[in-house]
Structure formats: C-alpha cells, structure tokens
Amino acid sequence: MLEIKQLHKSYPIGKDKLHVLKGIDLSVQSGELVAIMGSSGSGKSTLLNIIGMLDELDEGTYTLDNVPIVNLNEKKAAQYRNKFLGFIFQSFNLINYKNAVENVALPLYYQGFKRKERMEKAMFHLKKVGLENWAHHLPNELSGGQKQRVAIARALAAEPKLLLADEPTGALDTKTSYEIMDFIQELNDEGKTILIVTHEEDIANMCKRIVRLKDGVIMEDKFVEQVRASQYV
Ligand code: ADP
Ligand code: MG
C-alpha cells in the first residue's frame, strides 16, 4: 500500500533548519490499522502530512499504491489525494455554514459527481455513521463526537484506499473517543487501511501495530494484540 525509505524532512527556522524526520523507513500493507505514536513535536503530523501529500519530503522515497510520489505539482497532488486518501483531523475541519450532509458531499463535488448523486452518496455515508437524522443540522448544532462522525463520513465519501487520521480523538472525552475508535475498528474490519496519529496509549492499543517516533527516528515498530473499543462503549 505504501512504502517510505530513508525519508528526511527539515523546516527552515531563520537561518537554521530544524531536522524533524531523520531517515524514516516505513511500509504499510493493505488492511493494516497503524498507530503513529510519539510525544508532542516528535514529527507525527509532519510524517502524516507527507504521506497525505499535504507536504513534501526533502530526501528519500515514497511510493503509494505503486505510484512514486515525487515532484507532484499541486494539481497532480490534489488528484492523487482525491483518488487515494481520506483525512480526519482533531478539530474536525467541517465547514460551519454547510449542514452535515453538505459537508459529507463536498469531496464528491471535486470528483465531478452531479448534485443528486452527491446527496445520495453522502446520505449513505451519514447513515453508516448513524447520523441520518442529523443530515440537515449545522456543525454548531452537533456534539464533538457527532462532528467527528460527520468528518469520518466525509472522509469515506470518496471511497479512499487509505484513511489518515491526525489525533482524531484529541478533542473528545474518553467515552466519545472509544465510540469513534469502535467505528474506526469496524471500518478496518471491513478492510480499510488506516493510519492514526495519537499520543494516547489507550488509543494506540486499539490499533494492530504501533510505530513510535522519537527525535525524528522510529524507535519502535511492533504488532500488538488489538484492544476492542466496543467493550468500553
Ligand atoms: P507532532 O505532530 O508530533 O506534535 P509536528 O510534526 O507537528 O509534531 O512537528 C514537529 C516539529 O516540527 C515541531 O518542532 C514543530 O514546531 C516543527 N514544525 C512543524 N511544522 C512546521 C512548519 N511548517 N514550519 C516550521 N516548523 C514546523
Ligand atoms: Mg501533531
């Protein structure tokens, strides 16, 4: 599914540079559920953003679905993102003046679907996250957990091969976090490949593999016995 070799990434800080990722090797197979762990500032989001083609690597190689991701212009990168990837963020990133179903339908607009089809597909995915009765509510009328469900439905709408989640439970209380993880585990059971950035041990243990970043290198990469979130919800 994806293969990264000897990835380096620095950010310029005045005249200096901050070397954030220092030779990352990572491959992920189709169907995996991987947690990327590490303390704040360890480079988790930087790695996820490079995987998500939101940022570029300085050195090394990155292959996604057998396509080398190199020197993509903005248009090409957007095409690949739409085709392969779904994103979930800590802060949900919903559009405030659009209701739930319109938010979910948005990526389908960029894929060229007609309005009727967009709305049908969006409703299908809203149903999947249990929010069909909230379709016409605005984000500010929804709880945090409901907002994240809308964001998940939106990420799924374009049927991505790979789901990337940056601290998806970071803004949620424990119970709601586990409900979201339960849903993420079900998606993975259905075969979806998912990468989750988190700094919470309990969330990481609900994945099948934990990759630990420290000071820009992978210090540990192991498969774990998956804790099911359903026992807590
Ligand atoms: P994490 O997600 O693990 O908390 P990040 O990947 O966001 O860490 O950041 C890693 C380091 O890179 C931090 O020190 C952060 O301040 C720095 N950094 C991240 N993005 C930028 C940027 N666009 N410009 C400069 N520094 C950045
Ligand atoms: Mg981060």
Image (cartoon, grey):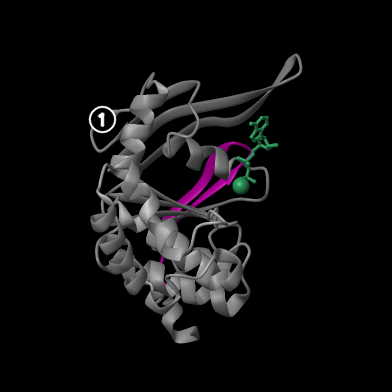
Residue at image position (42%, 58%) is: 102
Mark 1, Cα crowd under 10 Å, few <14 / some 14-19 / many 20+, is few
Furthest toward the top, the residue is 15
Residue at image position (40%, 40%) is: 26
Q: Choose between 2 and 79: the one closer to the eye.
A: 79
The answer to whether residue 33 is visible is: no
Furthest toward the right, the residue is 14
**What is the quadrant of the N terminus in the image?**
top left
Q: Kindly indicate the quadrant of the structure image that contains residue 170.
A: bottom right
In the rendered image, the vertical position of residue 175 relative to residue 154, given as above or below: below
* Stretch of the chain drawn in magenta: 209-226
Residue 203 shown in magenta: no
Question: Where is residue 46 shown, x and y percent of the image?
Answer: 55, 38
Residue at image position (48%, 85%) is: 233
Q: Kindly indicate the quadrant of the structure image that contains residue 173.
A: bottom right
Question: Where is residue 45 shown, x and y percent of the image?
Answer: 56, 43
Q: Choose between 111 and 30: the one closer to the eye.
A: 111
Q: Is residue 199 left or right of residue 115?
A: right
In the rendered image, the vertical position of residue 72 relative to residue 156, given as above or below: above
Q: Is most of the magenta stretch helix, strand or loop?
A: strand
User: Which residue position is annotated with label 1?
Assistant: 67
In the rendered image, the vertical position of residue 93 relative to residue 48, given as above or below: below
Residue at image position (39%, 20%) is: 73
> Does the beta carbon of the residue at mark 1 sit less than 8 Å from ligand 1?
no
